């Protein structure tokens, strides 16, 4: 089993930056692809960014490309999301997830393991 824990959320002003972290424990997931999602109140969960097992293949949603950067730690057990130029519409609960495959995964349904989420609130 894989246990994922997000951290780094908070309340910031528009234009500020935040760095989210996702720490994995339990079964090693260095060979698994991982991703970030977010869910605003009353909305469906939205794909943000994904990275493959090696950290070399990365994909972003159009809404965050150029502002957010996804990366993995050297051990493969951690994942980060650097968020710059935050906007009020970025306010949501942010989730990290891991899939049981090595290649990059975009589809929400293909992710097996999920964290509990961390709240990001951006005020105007």
Image (cartoon, rainbow, N blue to C red):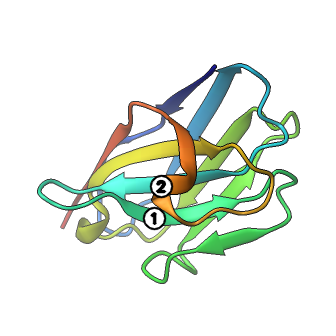
- SS class, disc 1: strand
Name the residue: 32% across, 57% down.
45
The N terminus lies in which quarter of the figure? top right
**SS at mark 2?**
helix
Left or right of 117, for residue 54: right
Of residues 71 and 32, the one drawn nearer to the viewer in this rendering: 32
| Residue 109 can be seen in this image | yes
Dot 1 alpha-carbon crowd within 10 angstroms: few under 14, some 14 to 19, many 20 or more: many
> 91 above or below 20?
below
Residue at point 59%, 36% (across, down): 22
Q: Please give the name of the residue rendered at 11% of the width and 57% of the height, measured from the top-left corner.
A: 42
Residue at x 26%, y 58% (from the top left corner): 91
- Above or below, comparing residue 104 to residue 65 in the picture: above
Task: Name which quarter of the figure residue 124 lies in.
Answer: bottom left
Q: Quadrant of residue 105?
A: bottom right
User: As rendered, which of 63 and 2 lies closer to the eye?
Assistant: 2
Quarter of the figure with residue 21: top right
Q: Which residue is mark 2?
A: 109
Residue 10, image x and y in percent? 34, 41
Neighbor class of circle 2 (other Cα within 10 Å; few <14, some 14-19, many 20+) is few
Indicate the position of residue 54 as horizontal and vertical percent values. Answer: 88, 53
């Amino acid at each position: 089993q894989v246990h994922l824990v997000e951290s780094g959320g908070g309340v910031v002003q528009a234009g500020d930056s935040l760095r989210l972290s996702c720490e994995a424990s339990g079964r090693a997931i260095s060979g698994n692809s991982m991703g970030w999602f977010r869910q605003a109140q009353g909305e469906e969960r939205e794909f943000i960014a994904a990275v493959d097992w090696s950290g070399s293949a990365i994909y972003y949603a159009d809404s965050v490309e150029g502002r957010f950067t996804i990366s993995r730690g050297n051990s493969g057990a951690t994942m980060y999301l650097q968020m710059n130029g935050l906007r009020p519409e970025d306010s949501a609960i942010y989730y990290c997830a891991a899939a049981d495959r090595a290649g990059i995964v975009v589809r929400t349904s293909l992710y097996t393991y999920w964290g509990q989420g961390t709240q990001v609130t951006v005020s105007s």
